[in-house]
């Protein structure tokens, strides 16, 4: 593959399909299209997304990790988690830091959804939260965003930042309602899943991953909708 062809291939990726792109790329690299990612995997991908790790860095890191794995003389177990690729992804992200492609990743990507889908996303999430006591303020914010969806559509990066802030508020509300036993159970589950991969991540990465994992589990346990545009369907 030539350098120009490779660059065109990476730039063809759509930033707002971050989760889907990573999931499908990992499945192809692993050679098992039916492989399902775990809650830890999704939390790790979310950590990379929120930290601004370019999609291209994640995909290249996955490729590099699998190339290294396949080069081993003895492969005692299959790669069963995206976390196996964490160090390779970090290496690729550091290599891409400061590049024009990184800085312009969102600007170069066209929205993969029409305005009507955005309006539907914001309105439906607002309705979901209206039905849950204690989240009325967040629902009202989403209703205002839905009413100005045409304006918001012109700045999806700014809208995404607003939605992430609202998700964080929802997570904080939910966290105060969990018992100590519930939180302990989730942390123990995270520790069990992370044990084989701790050596591949820095302390800062592990801290971020723990927060995103806990928030993700909280949203799932109480049935809260995800607000980010990366969950728009």
Image (spheres, grey):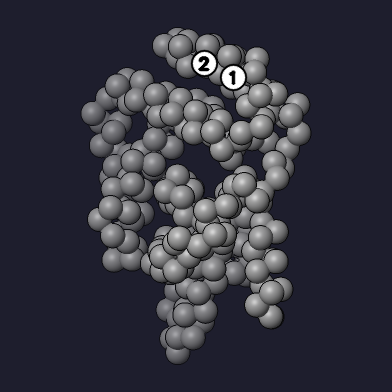
SS at circle 2: helix
Residue in the picture at 33% in, 66% down: 200
> Residue 86: x and y, percent?
41, 63
Q: Which residue is mark 2?
A: 141
Q: Is residue 157 above or below residue 199?
A: above
Dots 1, 2 in contact, CB < 8 A = yes
Q: Position of residue 68 (x, y in %)?
A: 47, 80
The answer to whether residue 179 is left or right of residue 67 is left
Of the pair 132 and 16, the residue shown nearer to us = 16
- Residue in the image at 52% along x and 16% along y: 141
Closest to the observer, 177 or 65: 65
- Does any portion of residue 215 appear in the rendered image? yes
The quadrant the C terminus occupies is: top right
Judged left or right of residue 183, residue 62 is: right
Total of numbered circles in the picture?
Answer: 2
Residue 20 visible, this orientation: no
Above or below residue 197? Residue 228 is above
70 to the left or right of 24: left
The residue lying at 36 percent from left, 48 percent from top is 209
Q: Position of residue 181 (x, y in %)?
A: 25, 31
Return the residue nearer the eye: 187 or 161.
161
Residue linked to disc 1: 145
Locate residue 72: give its quadrant: bottom left
Quarter of image, res 199: bottom left
């Amino acid at each position: 593959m030539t350098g120009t062809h490779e660059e065109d291939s990476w730039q063809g990726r759509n930033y707002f399909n971050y989760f889907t792109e990573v999931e499908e790329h990992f499945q192809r690299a692993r050679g098992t299209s039916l492989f399902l990612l775990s809650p830890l995997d999704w939390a790790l991908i979310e950590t990379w997304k929120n930290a601004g790790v370019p999609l291209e860095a994640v995909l290249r890191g996955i490729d590099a990790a699998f190339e290294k794995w396949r080069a081993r003389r003895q492969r005692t177990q299959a790669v069963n988690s995206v976390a196996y690729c964490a160090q390779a992804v970090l290496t690729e992200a550091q290599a891409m830091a400061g590049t024009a492609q990184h800085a312009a990743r969102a600007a170069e990507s066209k929205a993969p959804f029409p305005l009507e889908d955005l309006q539907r996303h914001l309105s439906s999430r607002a309705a979901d939260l209206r039905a849950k006591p204690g989240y009325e303020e967040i629902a009202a914010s989403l209703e205002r965003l839905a009413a100005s969806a045409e304006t918001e559509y012109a700045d999806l990066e700014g809208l995404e930042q607003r939605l992430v802030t609202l998700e964080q508020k929802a997570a904080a509300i939910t966290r105060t309602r969990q018992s100590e036993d519930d939180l302990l159970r989730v942390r123990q589950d995270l520790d069990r899943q992370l044990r084989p991969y701790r050596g591949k991540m820095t302390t800062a990465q592990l801290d971020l991953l723990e927060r995103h994992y806990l928030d993700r589990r909280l949203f799932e346990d109480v049935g809260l909708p995800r607000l980010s545009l990366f969950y728009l369907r």
